[in-house]
Amino acid sequence: MKDNIKRRWTRRCVDLLLPRLSGSWSKHSFRLFFSLCFVLSLCFCNNSAYTQNLESLSSADLYRLIAQLENDEEYLQAANAYRLLAERDLAEIENLDRSIKNYLEAQKLYRRAGDSVSMYQVIADLGRLYCGSEYYLEAIGMFERVRGYGERTQDTLLQARMLQQIGEIYIARNILDEASDYLLRASRMNLMVQDTLLSNINRLTISALTGRKNFFNDLPDSLVIALSKFDSVRYRSFLPSIHLHVGMYNMHMKKYELALYYFEQGMKLVGKDMFVKRELFRKQAECYEKMNNYTKAPVLQQAAKSTRKITATVF
C-alpha cells in the first residue's frame, strides 16, 4: 500500500509542477514548488526521517499534509503530525484550547493506526493539560485510563506514575485521605520495580500531609536528595514533582529555606507543566507566609492564580 501511496504522491506532484515549468514564477509558485518537493521527499524517507522532517514544516503546511495523509490512510503519520502541532501550541498559553483539540485528534488516529503505546502517551499528556487547567475530574479519568492500560500490559512503573499523578491532584484539592491512599499505592508499585527513592518520598509526603508516622520509626528532621545523571534520565518529566514533594516535606518539618530551595529547583525544571508550576507557586507562597514574609507571599499567590483556565470541550 505504501508503494501505491508514493506513486500517487509522485503523480500529483508532477501534475502540479508541470504547469509551473514555463513562464515567470510568482512567490506563491516558488512556495508551492518547494513544499511539493519536500512532501515528495517524505514519501521516500523511512519513518524516523519522516518524523524528523515533519518538524521543519510550518503549522499551516502540517494541517494540509494531515488532510492528505488521512485521505491516504496514513493514520500513524497523521497522528504524529497532530501531536507535533499540539506540542507547538503548548508554548503559547492562548493556544491551549487548540493544543487539546490536536491531542484528541492524535489520540483518535493512533487508535486507528493500532499504536496503543503512542495513544496512551497522548492520553497522559491530555491528563496533564487538564490538570493545568484545573479540570481535575477529567484529568483523573485520563490518568485512570492510562493506569488501566499499564495494568493490562503489566507495566508496573506506568501504573505507579499514574497513581502518583492522581495523588497530586487530591493534594491540590486538599482531599488528603484520598491523596494518601493513591500515594501509598504508588509507593508499593515503586517498590515492586525497586524504585526506593520515589517510594520513600511518597511515604514521607503522606507523613507530612497527615502526621502519620507508621511508615518510619523516626522521621528525618529534613530531606535532602542527590540525583545522579541516571536519575535525571530515569525520572525526566517527574523531576519537578520530586522537587515539589521534597520541598513539601521540608516545609512540614519547618526547614523553610531548604523547602524554598527545592521549590525553586522544581521551577527551573517544570517546563510547560502548568499543574506542577501552579503547585510550586502555591507552596512557595505558603512557605513565605510561614516565614512571615508578607511581601513575597502575595506575589507568588497571584502567580499561581494567573495560569489561565482553558475552555476546550472535554471528551
Image: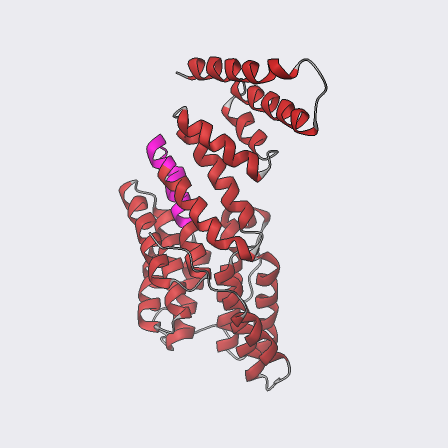
User: In the picture, residue 13 is in which quadrant?
Assistant: top right
Reply yes or no: does residue 154 show up in magenta: no
Q: Is residue 24 above or below residue 209?
A: above
The residue that appears at 58% across and 66% down in the rendered structure is 262
Q: Position of residue 235 (x, y in %)?
A: 50, 50
- Residue at the right extreme, as displayed: 24
Q: Position of residue 18 (x, y in %)?
A: 60, 13
Q: Is residue 168 visible?
A: yes
The residue shown at (52%, 42%) is: 85
Provide the residue span drawn in magenta: 109-124
Q: Nearer the viewer, residue 290 or 122?
A: 122
Task: Indicate the colouring scheme.
Answer: secondary structure
Residue 246 in view here: no
Q: Position of residue 29 (x, y in %)?
A: 66, 24
Residue sitting at x 70%, y 26%: 26
Tell me: residue 116, above or below residue 297: above
User: Where does residue 71 sit, x and y in percent of width and height?
Assistant: 40, 26
Q: Residue furthest front?
A: 23
Q: Is 105 rendered above or below residue 197? A: above
Front residue of 182/141: it is 141
State the residue in front, 271 or 225. 271
Quadrant of the snapshot with the N terminus: top left
| Magenta residues, dominant SS class | helix
Numbered-mark total: 0
Reply above or below: 157 against 50.
below
Q: Is residue 117 magenta?
A: yes
Q: Between 312 and 131, which is closer to the camera in this rendering?
A: 312
